[in-house]
């Protein structure tokens, strides 16, 4: 008797869970649907469900030189800044993982505190300095900033991965006479490779989605996808299908990376506080 | 002599860490010091003939005492951030509890529930503002109209709520993930012990699960607040801080001061105050949380 009651309750909870998942994903489904409509169907009232799907807006996007440029900019900035953050951050994480815990903790807290500083606190001088140094609206200028944005994440996350590398391996390697750097490259890095991949994926995602720095410090040359999408804010009632196609394309890369990084997502978001 | 390798190893450790520290100082701390310096000057980019005179704390005085919109933007920030954090934490807890069971398709459901977090802020805003919430062609306003409730125009009638709704959609997955990690870390014996004690589901949740989840709730609250205090893209796209200054938050107001007034001194002072407000909120939260989730003495 009790078992059946529990079964019914369980079925109810499972159904509720499915309903919640559907509700959460619905805005994305609706966006994808709209991207397949004609512009007339996109604003039809009542909303049209029986429409003839078209890939026209995707074709347009792929032929739109302007859109492709923003896409390319986003890729260059996301990949460039991730590479830089890893090159600086991974050795630092390794160095910290070798230090005594108390000493390392101080440095780590300080590194985390730089992440807590709202970007709005530094954007004004960056704007002024970048304009006078010729870094405004350049790849280099933006890569430098996105790398700084992701560096604390790389250090915290990689340190938590390095902590999982068996200490005996590191010691054995140093007894064999290998220096710190060689131990890092030949023993530790290969073991931490999945961790590096997960960290890099998260860095790419955050750089890809970043908007505040981009809208302040990019112009026509290095504008990113989030900036391009923000251009649709004034086109009320117009081009909803085109907007939806552009939006869908903008979020697809991140969804794929996010799916791949799913298992380390919590670790990354909490800076390694939760494994 | 014997200390040789040890000293060398220590030097090596420092050499490994130093570039990162120098880099972070140069790109975050140094610009912030410059922000402090600028905030003490009167400097408007479009009026170079005025020069850049040192004016002490007068920018701060003007922002705090004579600028009503600035004060509104602080209140808006607190109200909007607070609503988003509380609502997404509550929903996130609900979803985490639902996910913390075994049922068919759990992995897929988990992936679906996470996806809103990966949507970039500007896509989030154009989709919600137009496709879903537009008063004339939006899906939701069509739905309310069909139900005889009239056309929903949330950005006119309750603009803050509009911002909150789209941000909650985005941030609920974050809260859910952190809390789910917490639920999964709870030892199974706890649940069994509660069963033996004859606790029903609610009292087990209230007296066992929730207190044990305390540290995770704290973490979700704190990190969530830090991220959500910086909410910008949604406001930029959906409302531009309006109507009037109804959705102008501190970060958005700083953006307006620098990009529309080109007022470097004032924008810097506002930015400094924004950081003060953010730190105050964070430390207040930390203190509150310490009190709320202290283990119950029995």
Image (cartoon, coloured by chain):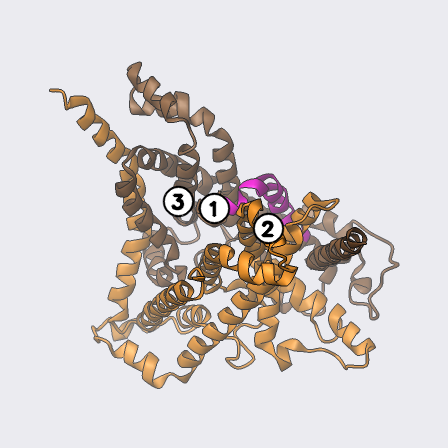
The span from disc 3 to disc 1 (Cα, nearest Å) is 18 Å
Q: Is residue B79 visible?
A: yes
**Label 3: chain?**
A
Which chain gets the brown colouring?
A: A
Residue A197 percent across, percent down from the top left:
51, 34
Q: Residue at x 36, y 37 (%)?
A: A93
Query: What type of secondary structure mainly makes up the magenta span?
Result: helix
Around disc 1, counting alpha carbons within 10 Å, would you say few (fewer than 14), some (14 to 19), or many (20 or more)?
A: some
For the record, the magenta segment spans A248-268
Residue at the farthest top position: A176
Labels 3 and 1 within one chain: yes
Nearer the observer: mark 3 or 1; the answer is 1
Instruction: Write down the residue under mark 3.
Output: A151
Instruction: Write down the residue under mark 1.
Output: A274
Residue B278 percent across, percent down from the top left:
38, 66
Colour seen for chain B: orange
Kindly state the secondary structure of the residue where label 1 is placed.
loop
Around disc 2, counting alpha carbons within 10 Å, would you say few (fewer than 14), some (14 to 19), or many (20 or more)?
A: some
Q: Are marks 3 and 1 in contact (CB under 8 Å)?
A: no
| A64 relative to B204, above or below | above
Identify which residue, B80 or B293, lies in the foreground. Answer: B293
Q: Residue at x 34, y 53 (%)?
A: A114
Per the image, is A259 magenta? yes
Nearer the observer: mark 3 or 2; the answer is 2
Instruction: Write down the residue under mark 2.
Output: B191
Per the image, is B45 magenta? no
Q: Residue at x 30, y 50 (%)?
A: A110
């Amino acid at each position: 008797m009790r078992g059946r009651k529990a079964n019914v309750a369980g079925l109810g909870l499972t159904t509720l869970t499915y309903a919640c998942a559907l509700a959460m994903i619905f805005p994305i489904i609706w966006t994808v649907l709209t991207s397949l409509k004609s512009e007339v169907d996109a604003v039809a009232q009542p909303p049209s469900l029986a429409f003839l799907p078209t890939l026209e807006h995707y074709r347009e996007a792929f032929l739109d030189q302007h859109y492709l440029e923003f896409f390319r900019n986003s890729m260059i900035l996301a990949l460039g800044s991730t590479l830089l953050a890893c090159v600086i951050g991974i050795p630092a994480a390794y160095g910290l993982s070798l230090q005594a815990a108390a000493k390392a903790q101080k440095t780590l807290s300080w590194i985390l505190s730089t992440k807590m500083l709202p970007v709005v606190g530094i954007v004004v001088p960056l704007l002024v300095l970048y304009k006078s140094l010729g870094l405004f609206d350049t790849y280099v200028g933006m890569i430098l900033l996105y790398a700084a944005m992701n560096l604390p994440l790389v250090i915290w996350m990689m340190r938590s991965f390095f902590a999982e590398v068996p200490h005996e391996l590191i010691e054995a390697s140093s007894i064999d006479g290998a220096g710190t750097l060689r131990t890092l490259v030949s023993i530790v890095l290969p073991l931490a490779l999945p961790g590096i991949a997960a960290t890099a994926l998260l860095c790419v995602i955050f750089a890809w989605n970043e908007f505040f720095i981009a809208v302040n410090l990019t112009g026509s040359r290095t504008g990113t996808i989030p900036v391009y999408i923000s251009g649709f804010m004034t086109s009320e009632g117009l081009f909803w299908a085109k907007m939806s196609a552009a939006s869908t394309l903008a979020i697809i890369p991140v969804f794929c990376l996010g799916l791949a990084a799913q298992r380390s997502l919590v670790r990354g978001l909490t800076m390694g506080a939760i494994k | 002599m014997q200390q040789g390798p040890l000293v060398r190893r220590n030097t090596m450790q420092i050499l490994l860490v130093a570039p990162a520290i120098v880099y972070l100082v140069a790109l975050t701390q140094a610009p912030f010091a410059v922000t402090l310096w600028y905030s003490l000057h009167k400097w408007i980019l479009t009026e170079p003939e005025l020069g850049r005179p040192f004016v002490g704390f007068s920018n701060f005085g003007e922002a705090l005492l004579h600028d009503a919109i600035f004060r509104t933007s602080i209140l808006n920030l607190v109200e909007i951030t607070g609503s988003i954090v509380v609502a997404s934490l509550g929903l996130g807890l609900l979803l985490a509890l639902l996910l913390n069971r075994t049922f068919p398709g759990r992995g897929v459901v988990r992936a679906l529930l996470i996806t809103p977090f990966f949507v970039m802020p500007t896509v989030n805003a154009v989709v919600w503002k137009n496709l879903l919430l537009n008063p004339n062609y939006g899906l939701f306003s069509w739905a309310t109209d069909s139900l005889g409730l009239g056309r929903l125009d949330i950005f006119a009638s309750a603009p803050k709520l509009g911002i909150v709704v789209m941000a909650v959609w985005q941030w609920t997955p974050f809260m859910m993930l952190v809390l789910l990690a917490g639920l999964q870390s709870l030892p199974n014996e706890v649940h069994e012990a509660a069963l033996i004690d004859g606790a029903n589901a609610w009292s087990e949740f209230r007296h066992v699960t929730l207190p044990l989840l305390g540290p995770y709730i704290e973490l979700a609250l704190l990190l969530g607040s830090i991220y959500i205090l910086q909410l910008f893209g949604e406001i930029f796209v959906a409302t531009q801080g309006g109507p009037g200054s109804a959705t102008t938050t501190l970060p958005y107001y700083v953006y307006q001061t620098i990009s529309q007034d080109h007022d470097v001194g004032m924008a810097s002072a506002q930015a400094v105050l924004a950081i003060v407000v953010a730190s105050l909120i964070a430390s207040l939260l930390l203190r509150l949380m310490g009190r709320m989730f202290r283990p119950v003495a029995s």
